[in-house]
Image (tube, rainbow, N blue to C red):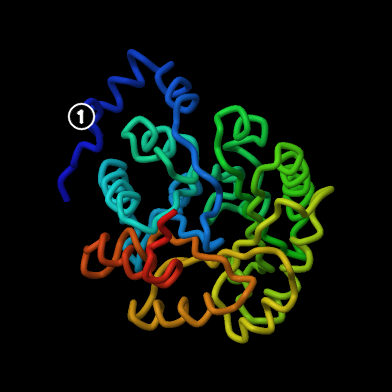
Amino acid sequence: MTTTPVSPSVRVADLTEIRVREPERIAAAWAARERRPLVREDGRLLLLAADHPARGALGVRGVGAAMASRSNLLERLVTALGRPGVDGVLGTPDVLDDLLLLGALEGKVAIGSMNRGGLQGASFELDDRFTAYTAAEIAARGLDGGKMLTRICLDDPGTVATLAASAQAVTELAEQRLLAMVEPFLSVRQEGRVVNQLDPDSTIKSVHIAAGLGASSAYTWLKLPVVDELDRVMDATTLPTLLLGGDPQGDPEETYASWGHALALPAVRGLVVGRALLFPPDEDVAAAVDIAAGLVHGADGGAP
């Protein structure tokens, strides 16, 4: 895929030079960024997920280094963010700063990924420390909220530190009236790997644990997987919920159908999808994103 400039002045090829000679442009661009309400009239969100690389998770559909090229990833993100119905993006500071300089975050929702310390495959993977955005930095930069991965393993002592840090982040974001997106899983170690339990009962238990984090739930949203018996899972909470895409497997049409069913549930308010939309099997990012936007926002594409 070729790199396309997003604005007359900044291209992907210019980003390193800006970082070398004018790093102050990043703070200035955050201060000048055009913002929008978190949700439009329909109360729904379609967000792109771009925080996987910071946890060392570069694979898509079994291709281990699919997300290794930053220029390629940025081009895909820029294409997707330019489609109607895409509300914004979830990412780490390096990715969001790049997109900001490219002009791709104007009028978009920007959610900062907060804890990326639980590197994929590491012995300390479940000690998921906060190594990226802080709540204070999210507020200072004018982002719209923060996301925290909260894996709960009853046999791993790292879980308690993750729970405490997530609770603090929820509290601090609520104090700033910013969205706190909690992504909970009940997890286990199997043959040296961390495996998330994706059955309905495990997901329900994770929902209840996540909903109780922090001193206020006023600004808490959940980010949950699409699992079986989702109707029963969603009855476990009144918190607004966005569904995650995960590492795509199988037929995209089956994935879209499962999203469509899930989006009919009242508590489900949209999708947070990365790899399934940014790396579709046919490489047509725009077409994949347009299908997801239609599922989330309907015929109007989420227009204000």
Q: Amino acid at mark 1?
A: Pro
- Point out the residue furthest to the bottom here: 229
Q: Tell me the quarter of the picture where residue 106 sits.
A: top left
Residue 9 x %, y %: 23, 25
Q: Residue at x 67, y 36 (%)?
A: 135
Q: How busy is the neighbourhood of tag 1: few (under 14 within 10 Å), some, or many (20 plus)?
A: few
- Image height of 203 relative to 128, above or below: below
Q: Secondary structure at mark 1?
A: loop
Name the residue at the top extreme: 21
- Taking 68 as reference, is 35 left or right? right
Answer left or right for 266 relative to 17: right
Q: Quadrant of residue 132?
A: top right
Residue 174 shows in the view = yes
Left or right of 217? Residue 34 is left
Q: How many marks?
A: 1
Reply above or below: 177 against 60: above
Q: Residue furthest left?
A: 2
Residue at 46% of width from left, 81% of height from top?
258
Residue at left offset 22%, top offset 63%: 283
- Whole-percent x, y for residue 10 in the image: 25, 28
Q: Is 186 positioned to the left or the right of 247 in the image?
A: right
**Label 1 belongs to which residue?**
8
Image location (x, y in percent) of residue 248 = 39, 70
How far from the left and from the top, in percent, is residue 158? 73, 52
Q: Quick check: can you spot residue 68?
A: no
Q: Quick check: 12 above or below 18?
A: below
Q: Residue at x 56, y 45 (%)?
A: 113
